[in-house]
């Protein structure tokens, strides 16, 4: 059992609120217009993101999210564009607050990064986890008054079956399925929540806008 509160106590500086807006697939430009109307500006180059998620054989992390467990965790390897730079990330959630720890991996190839990550996970949490899902998308970055926003499109996922078996993982052989939406996400510290609610979070009612508990990772299993 992972004692999430012990890890959260060490990650207070990373504490943030995340609010997501889902638009139908192809609404990317409209969501971008919303950001510009709110006077957000670009602050980082667009890039392609890949996240390889880990879970138990029984998918305990997915189940915790779907069941609304107040303290939960996601663990993933994240890499960008075609670079051979891999980060192991722990994302903790307690109610509506999120926390993140990033570990730069030494490995320069994905399979080596998987094995390296599994060793680190066993050391940190005393559990065995396995690759369970690959998610890829294109992201743009925006900012206004210390409130950051990201805009994701071309979101694809692939469930990794027989993930607990020892075999070479090849991301290029995975059958990727496109998710039926684009995502606008706001990220900010808790002390800016009142400002966000009063001056920014005015999304039209025809969009699904709330502080969602379901992530791309969880949606991948819900759509499968």
Image (cartoon, grey):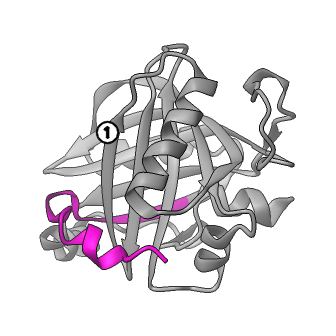
Q: In the picture, which quadrant includes the C terminus?
A: bottom right
Q: Residues within 10 Å of mark 1 (few under 14, many from 20)?
A: many
Q: Is residue 147 visible?
A: yes
Q: Position of residue 167 (x, y in %)?
A: 80, 32
Left/right of residue 34 with respect to residue 13 in the rendered view: right
**Mark 1 = which residue?**
142
Choose between 96 and 113: the one closer to the eye. Answer: 113
Q: Position of residue 183 (x, y in %)?
A: 55, 51
Choose between 82 and 84: the one closer to the eye. Answer: 84
Question: Where is 122 relative to 200, above or below?
Answer: above
Left/right of residue 50 with respect to residue 200 in the rendered view: right
Question: Which stretch is magenta?
Answer: 1-21
Q: Quadrant of residue 18?
A: bottom left
Q: Position of residue 149 (x, y in %)?
A: 35, 48
- Could you tell me which residue is drawn at 51 percent across and 60 percent down? 74
Q: Position of residue 49 (x, y in %)?
A: 53, 31
């Amino acid at each position: 059992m992972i004692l999430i509160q012990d890890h959260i106590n060490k990650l207070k500086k990373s504490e943030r609120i995340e609010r997501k807006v889902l638009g139908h697939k192809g609404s990317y430009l409209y969501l971008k217009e919303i950001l510009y109307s709110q006077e957000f500006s670009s602050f980082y180059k667009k890039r392609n993101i890949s996240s390889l998620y880990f879970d138990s054989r029984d998918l305990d992390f997915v189940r915790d999210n779907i069941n609304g467990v107040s303290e939960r965790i996601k663990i993933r390897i994240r890499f960008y564009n075609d670079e051979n730079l891999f980060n192991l990330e722990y994302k903790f959630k307690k109610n509506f607050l999120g926390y993140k720890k990033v570990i730069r991996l030494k490995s320069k190839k994905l399979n080596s990064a998987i094995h390296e990550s599994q060793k680190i996970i066993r050391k940190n949490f005393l559990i065995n986890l396995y690759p369970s899902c690959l998610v890829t998308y294109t992201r743009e970055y925006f900012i206004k008054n210390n409130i950051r926003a990201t805009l994701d499109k071309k979101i694809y996922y692939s469930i990794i079956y027989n993930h607990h078996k020892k075999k070479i993982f090849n991301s290029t052989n995975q059958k990727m399925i496109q998710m039926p939406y684009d995502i606008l996400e706001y990220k900010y510290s808790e002390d800016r929540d009142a400002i966000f609610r009063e001056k920014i979070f005015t999304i039209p009612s025809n969009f699904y806008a709330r502080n969602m508990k379901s992530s791309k990772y969880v949606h991948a299993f819900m759509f499968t």
